[in-house]
Image (cartoon, grey):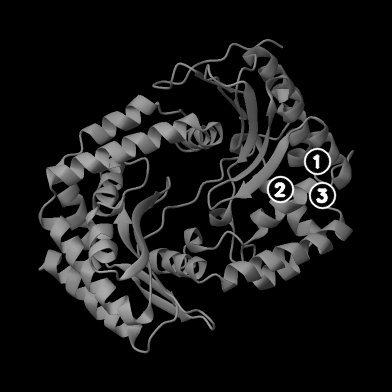
Amino acid sequence: MTHSLSRPTCGDDDTEVLVLPNGVRILAVRPPHLASTNVSIYVRTGSRHESARLNGISHVVEHMAFKGTATRDCQQINLEAELLGAEVNAHTDKDHTAYHMRGLARDALSFVRMLGDIVRHGSFPEAELERERQVILQEFIEDEDDALSTAFKLFDEASFGRHALAQPVIGRRRNIERFSRDELTGYVARQYTGSNLIVAVSGPVDPQALAREVEAVFGDMPTGTPNLVAPPTWVGGVKSRRQAGSSQTHLVAGFPLPDRLDPLAATGVMAAAVLGEGMSSPLLDRVRERLGLVYYAGCSTDQSDLAGQFVLEASTTAEHLEACQDEIVALLQAQAERVSETDLLRARNQIAVRAVRQREGAQHRLEMAALDLFALGRVRSGAEWMAALEVVDADAVRDCTRRMLAAPAAVAISGKVPTGTRERTEERMERLRSTVTG
């Protein structure tokens, strides 16, 4: 069957999209400079789609997808990819699971077939499951031992409470130890459906040939219904965890921001860059360069289609934690009152350069486009994003800062945590909030 690919509204000229009758979407990005190809299958399922009992199952499924299908065992899957010189990878996130192959453009259609086999026909052999369970448990232990990773998990809990968005991607130990083959296959049957799947390809690939191949591989997939999750309510609060053997103290603190689909999303990105992107930013210039309170500090945003977080992080020592918090509070108060044009210009140009570099990376661009398709049903152009940033002025950044400081802060502290830290941090953050709310 021959298809005519249609460009989504406001998309870039090199981006095309086709939707099959069962809801599977084909995303083709063809930058003129690429000679290789990236083929990715994005499935709209991740840790935020899991119940507490199933937390971690998306990640286990991703691992097990490469362990055998109805026609190929684990060794065949690896060898067939490597005979083509292909790089094979996968990842699980809160909002999606993705499977990737990268290699020569001539092999793009083969990559579609090979990835389609593992995504649709995984056999989840019992023996392989028991072996891979041990591998994932080792990954879990490594993650648990990482004080900074612990701080971020606590930060998500402080931000969103019991909402599934706060669940860790790697899941819970007891779940990993328990998951059965039937649970894995049942989860795939429910979540891996046409309306939740995107086949994304970058590189010099013929769109019509791609469409025919995708339909052959995925055309009979059940349509299903979109895997949607209700947005969380911001909670706030302070969480801490001491970790034996840690000589550093890790601080992650933040406030609510609009989700990435909100017209004000760009303002949050600008507010974070103004405060803490680059060595000349107020955050790094003050707490690292002038005072030497931290080894590392930074400010960023994490904005999904459900919610946004303004994120401050710092790695310091226990004796410097209080002073570090005081300086961060003072910097936030200052930004709520005034934003200099110099900081605004620096931040705008830093964001612009970062955006250009990310769009030059084929994998990152495919992922951002796929997430747009899941959330909006269209792909936003690079120009659309930059236009949203250009209209953000100093007053908008200041107002954004004031709005987020009016909410209860979410704070996580891990590693070497002095006695009484949580109580003193709660008092400090409440004083900060009162400066905005009166």
**Crowd around label 2: few <14 · some 14–19 · many ≥20 (10 Å):** some
Q: What is the C-alpha distance between the residues marked 2 and 3? A: 15 Å
Amino acid type of the residue that numbered disc 3 sits on in the rendered structure: Lys
Q: Provide the residue designation for mark 2.
A: 188
Question: Counting residues from the N terminus, which is met first, the one under dot 1 or under dot 3?
Answer: 3
Q: What is the C-alpha distance between the residues marked 1 and 3? A: 11 Å
Residue 20 visible in the picture: no
Q: Nearer the viewer, residue 154 or 196?
A: 154
* In-image side of 93 versus 111 (left or right): left
Q: Position of residue 153 (x, y in %)?
A: 49, 66
Asked if the residue at tag 3 contacts the one at tag 1, i.e. Cβ–Cβ closer than 8 Å, the answer is no
Q: Is residue 56 above or below residue 74?
A: below
SS of the residue at dot 3?
Answer: helix
Question: Counting residues from the N terminus, which is met first, the one under dot 1 or under dot 2?
Answer: 1
Q: What is the C-alpha distance between the residues marked 1 and 2? A: 10 Å
Question: Counting residues from the N terminus, which is met first, the one under dot 2 or under dot 3?
Answer: 3
* In-image side of 200 versus 421 (left or right): right
Q: Is residue 51 above or below residue 362?
A: below
Q: Is residue 164 above or below residue 202?
A: below
- Mark number, residue 121: 1
Kindly indicate the quadrant of the structure image that contains residue 193.
top right
Amino acid type of the residue that numbered disc 2 sits on in the rendered structure: Val
Q: Position of residue 308 (x, y in %)?
A: 36, 52
What residue is shown at x 19% (from left), y 46% (from top)?
343
- Mark number, residue 370: none
Camera-near label (1 vs 3) is: 3
SS of the residue at dot 1?
Answer: loop
Q: Provide the residue designation for mark 3.
A: 67
SS of the residue at dot 2?
Answer: helix
What residue is shown at x 75% (from left), y 58% (from top)?
183
* In-image side of 405 versus 422 (left or right): left
